[in-house]
Amino acid sequence: MKGKPLGQVFIMPDIHAYLEEILNTMNDGLMVVGPDGTVLLVNEALCRLTGYGRKELLGKSCTLFNCDSCEGERLGSGGKWCSLFVSGSMRNKRCLIMRKDGGYLHAVKNASVLRDERNRVIGAVETITDISELDRKEEQIVRLSRLLESEKGFHGIIGASPAMQRAFDITEKAAQSDAPVIIYGESGTGKELFTRAIHDLGPHRDGPYIQVNCAALNESLLESELFGHVKGAFTGATGHREGRFEAADGGDLFLDEIGDVPLSIQVKLLRVLENKQVERVGDHRPIPVDVRIITATNRDLPRMVREGSFRKDFFFRINVIPIHLPPLRERMEDLPLLVDAFLSRHRKKGKRIQGLSPQAMAHFMAYAWPGNVRELKSALEYACVLAGEGEIRPEHLPPHILRPSTPTAAPNAVPASPGATVAPSPAPRHMYPRDQRQELIDVLRQTGGNQSEAARILGVSRVTIWNRMKRYNIDLKKVIAS
Ligand SMILES: Nc1ncnc2c1ncn2[C@@H]1O[C@H](COP(=O)(O)OP(=O)(O)OP(=O)(O)O)[C@@H](O)[C@H]1O
């Protein structure tokens, strides 16, 4: 190589002779297009990242990549053309580029238009940086910090009762297999914690962990959330969307509230589970996916199957390894352990709380905990705020815990230390639907109809509040007015 130094810069006599080598040394993909989007030049990295051969790309339109960051700008004539040619450049834009095999490349794109000496646009240059590895590393960091945070218990799940020990046992074994697991339990019993434990213990632990709350979306949104859609598949589909199945490829997909999935989506899910392929909405190319399914519900699926609101074939496909989580009221011996664990978390955050007084613990033991562990966690948070420091006494507890019934457990039946294990409360109060309806009405009245606040007080999710209002036919306006 000949050339002459110019200050610190080394000027090459004919850089064009080396251009191809220079471009092919780059790790990022590079492409030059003409003013009409025709691909004029690509480097080796672009071919490697997209799976196309150079000959398959040269002379083709760049729309072949179906990149979702490419927006159409309306032109005077009424037609549309690439907004890059209007804005002049694009910097560090995250995008999805469709590879030849139909899969998406997660990338960051930089682009600039090229102009001649008379400032006329003669094309554009784009670089594509593959960030799939970065995304995977981010996911790994989240998983490792989660493991570090999980204190005592089984992957951070506290429970010494035989029912919980059994659940830990099945979970450990189920995690090793690839079979679909379904977790049954009321809201707040720890279904999500168990799912994470299955992922962390299972063969897909280094793959992604993706969660979808099936009750939170309507039918069409759920369909595109699960399977993805292509740009223009329906009104409002302004970009590609990678479905959760694709995002979970090589990992675990947690479908929460599976009992709320409409029948039409159940058919599609069944097909995906049988064929191990998904089709995006608006595109019929099957995409292979290797995903383990974990589902959870607080509904009685066998009954729903009998009543015809849940498909029998789908039920048998997902109900391979069922894990039943008992409600807190049926394993009250776990309550002091849970209290101890949650209070020690508050102490770590600087709260100078000693523990529960025997009277406060008696109220806890007598209460039915319809919102299960989530409700217990919220109640302790409330009590810590009110107590400030020292001992938590009954006056620091949320009023609805004191109100519905007098404690059935005698205060002297309660251990002096909240950490000690006790026998189950003599008569933990069970919550029947009528109680649950009245309790919800009381709390909604207390919060002036604020459903988020009611969810917080009862320790359940907003979706659960909404479902219960529907199930018990509660008219919010009437409740507030009364
Ligand atoms: N056994 C347990 N040990 C420690 N924390 C628990 C336990 N069970 C539940 N929790 C805590 O209670 C809260 C609710 O748990 P989680 O979200 O797993 O319940 P869920 O059954 O999935 O509820 P939902 O059906 O409403 O989504 C979380 O903050 C979780 O950390």
Image (cartoon, rainbow, N blue to C red):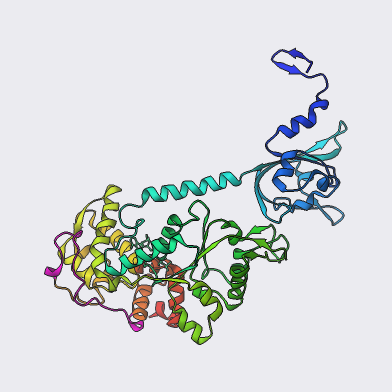
With 73 as the anchor, is 199 left or right in this view? left
Q: x and y percent of residue 23 in the render?
A: 75, 33
With 386 as the anchor, is 302 left or right in this view? right
Q: Is residue 295 above or below residue 108?
A: below
Q: x and y percent of residue 218 in the render?
A: 58, 71
User: Magenta span: helix, strand or loop, mainly?
Assistant: loop
Does residue 157 show up magenta in the picture? no
Quadrant position of the C terminus in the picture:
bottom left
Does residue 433 show up magenta in the picture? yes
Q: Is residue 111 visible?
A: no
With 402 as the anchor, is 287 left or right in this view? right
Which stretch appears magenta?
411-435
Quadrant position of the N terminus in the picture:
top right
Q: x and y percent of residue 10 in the render?
A: 73, 17
In the image, farthest residue toward the left: 412
Where is ligand 1, by quadrant? bottom left
Question: Which residue occupies 36% across, 70% down?
Answer: 325
